[in-house]
Image (cartoon, rainbow, N blue to C red):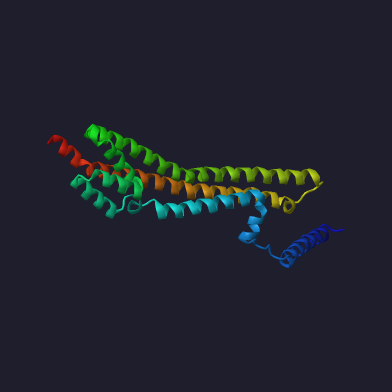
């Protein structure tokens, strides 16, 4: 066979192979993109645990928006009534009002008024102790956002590990596993990691925002409580 004929046949074979590959690629159906729900189904029980964390964290955020407010913890009308009673010297009535209303500023003012007979310094000292206790309660309340924000990434890591375990089990059970056979375990790992990081970012951010807000608000209410008892110092001088 002549070299030119051999070369021609070789070129024809290469062209045939290329054309077959292009035709096959054109005939192959395009890969279907999975929906968010289909991706979530790969997460298993860990994914549902992270949904529970998300729902709990969202409920806490809504509850904090409703209840952790200046007007809720130190109502303007209450402060004005206490100021009037203390100015009149009606301390017992002021204490009764604090017990009925409850809340941050009520508990602080009540603690100060209870110790009024011991002197202004003792009253302010007792008020400070009550303020520390009330501040601790608020911080403990918002700390659950931090807990959820830290649990989320850990659950994501757990899902990553379980997904890798599932993939390696496939490799062990099958002689020649294809990427499609391992896709479910890889999806489980990546989707769980994504969900865990998302929970951590959202709720840790919410926690630090509330932490700064509560710190600022409690300082303002502490000063307001001390200001309400200022008449005790003036009467002690006289």
Residue 100: x %, y % from top left? 35, 49
The tally of labels here is: 0
- Is residue 217 visible in this depiction of the protein? no
Q: Is residue 170 left or right of residue 227?
A: right
Q: Is 76 placed above or below 91 here?
A: below
Residue plotted at (80% across, 45% down) = 173
Task: Quadrant for the C terminus, please.
Answer: top left
The furthest residue to the left = 238
Q: Is 183 placed above or below 227 here?
A: below
- Is residue 114 visible in this depiction of the protein? yes
Task: Quadrant for the N terminus, please.
Answer: bottom right
Q: Nearer the viewer, residue 137 or 21?
A: 137
Q: Nearer the viewer, residue 158 or 64?
A: 64
Residue plotted at (31% across, 39% down) = 111
The furthest residue to the right = 1
Q: Is residue 224 left or right of residue 15?
A: left
Residue 98: x %, y % from top left? 32, 47
Q: Which quadrant of the figure has residue 180?
A: bottom right
Q: Is residue 94 left or right of residue 191?
A: left
Q: Is 122 placed above or below 12 here?
A: above
Residue plotted at (53% across, 51% down) = 56
Residue plotted at (59% across, 47% down) = 193
Q: Nearer the viewer, residue 130 or 82?
A: 82
Residue 187: x %, y % from top left? 66, 52
Q: Is residue 151 left or right of residue 87?
A: right
Q: Nearer the viewer, residue 25 or 100?
A: 100
């Amino acid at each position: 066979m002549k070299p030119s004929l051999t070369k021609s046949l070789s070129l024809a074979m290469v062209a045939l192979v290329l054309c077959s590959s292009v035709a096959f690629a054109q005939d192959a159906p395009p890969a279907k993109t999975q929906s968010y729900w289909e991706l979530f189904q790969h997460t298993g029980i860990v994914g549902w645990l992270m949904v529970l964390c998300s729902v709990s964290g969202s409920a806490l955020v809504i509850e904090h928006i409703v209840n952790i407010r200046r007007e809720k913890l130190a109502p303007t009308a209450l402060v004005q009534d206490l100021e009037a009673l203390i100015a009149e010297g009606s301390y017992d009535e002021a204490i009764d009002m604090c017990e009925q209303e409850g809340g941050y500023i009520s508990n602080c003012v009540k603690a100060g008024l209870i110790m009024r007979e011991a002197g202004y310094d003792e009253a302010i000292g007792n008020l400070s102790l009550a303020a520390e206790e009330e501040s601790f309660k608020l911080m403990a309340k918002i700390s659950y956002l931090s807990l959820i924000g830290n649990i989320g990434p850990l659950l994501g890591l757990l899902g990553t590990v379980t997904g890798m375990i599932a993939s390696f089990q496939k490799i062990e059970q099958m002689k020649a596993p294809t990427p499609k056979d391992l896709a479910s375990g890889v999806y489980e790992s990546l989707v769980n990691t994504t969900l865990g990081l998302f929970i951590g970012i959202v709720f840790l951010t919410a926690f630090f925002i509330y932490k700064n807000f509560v710190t600022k608000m409690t300082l303002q209410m502490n000063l307001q409580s001390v200001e309400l008892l200022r008449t005790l110092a003036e009467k002690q001088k006289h």
